[in-house]
Amino acid sequence: DAGITQSPRHKVTETGTPVTLRCHQTENHRYMYWYRQDPGHGLRLIHYSYGVKDTDKGEVSDGYSVSRSKTEDFLLTLESATSSQTSVYFCAISEADSHSGELFFGEGSRLTVL
Amino acid sequence: SQQGEEDPQALSIQEGENATMNCSYKTSINNLQWYRQNSGRGLVHLILIRSNEREKHSGRLRVTLDTSKKSSSLLITASRAADTASYFCATAGGSYIPTFGRGTSLIVHP
């Protein structure tokens, strides 16, 4: 199994509070991704990173920010959580120096915003 | 918006039968991938097929790709109860960023 750890795995928070999800990899892969999974929508890309301090927006980036200060860590921040951000968040990494390879996923972080 | 769309949304079969899932997409791709997700777990990569390939096999899995029809199929032969999961196709275009469909939920009855 690829070494990907997401934390926290479960979190309940209130509307308006900031939330940070962490993805940590031990594989030294260049690319890292944050997806959210919702019933009826499958997985949708929030942000991705192609190197330290190199990030770009995905399909559903509004309300989210990311940071990557080290190869192994990719943080997803909800500055002011809303109920629509209740979801399961998955981090993924990909091998080598190409996007074209397979993704390895973490186990997910379930976020509930009340 | 989703690039790939899986069909059917749900599939229920008996152990030993074959399961076929389809994926249709809208724009040109560089590769198409299939993933499996067991309940409450992360996705696991099954197979990748490149745009210049027509068919790939991996164990009991067979994937076909028809770029003229913008479609792919995943065949699981001799299904087992352990194959019960959701299956997703993901397409990668010029940016090589995988875009996922909504998935097919497969139930294999013992």
Image: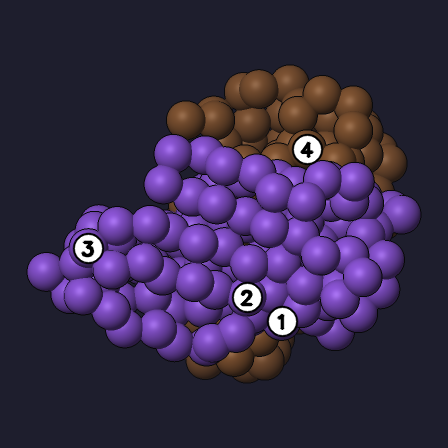
Chain colours: A brown, B purple
Contact? badges 2 and 1 (CB < 8 Å): no
Q: Nearer the viewer, mark 2 or mark 3?
A: 3
Drawn side of residue A69 relative to residue B107, left or right: right
Q: Which of marks 4 and 2 is in front?
A: 2
Residue at 27% x, 73% y is B12
The kind of residue tagged 1 is Glu
How many marks do you count on the picture? 4
Q: Do dots 4 and 1 share one subunit?
A: no
What's the mark number on residue B22? 2
Q: Name the residue under label 1.
A: B5
Query: Numbered disc 1: what chain?
Result: B
Residue at 89% x, 47% y is B94
Drawn side of residue B53 relative to residue B12, left or right: right
Work out whether A68 lies above or below A112: above
Query: Numbered disc 3: what chain?
Result: B
Q: Which of marks 4 and 1 is in front?
A: 1
Q: Residues within 10 Å of mark 3 (few under 14, many from 20)?
A: some
Q: How far apart are marks 1 and 3 (CA)?
A: 26 Å
Q: Which of marks 2 and 1 is in front?
A: 2
Q: Mark 4 points at which residue?
A: A101
Residue at 42% x, 43% y is B61
Contact? badges 4 and 3 (CB < 8 Å): no
Please, what secondary structure does the residue beneath circle 1 have?
strand
- Residue B1 image offset from top left, x and y in percent: 74, 73
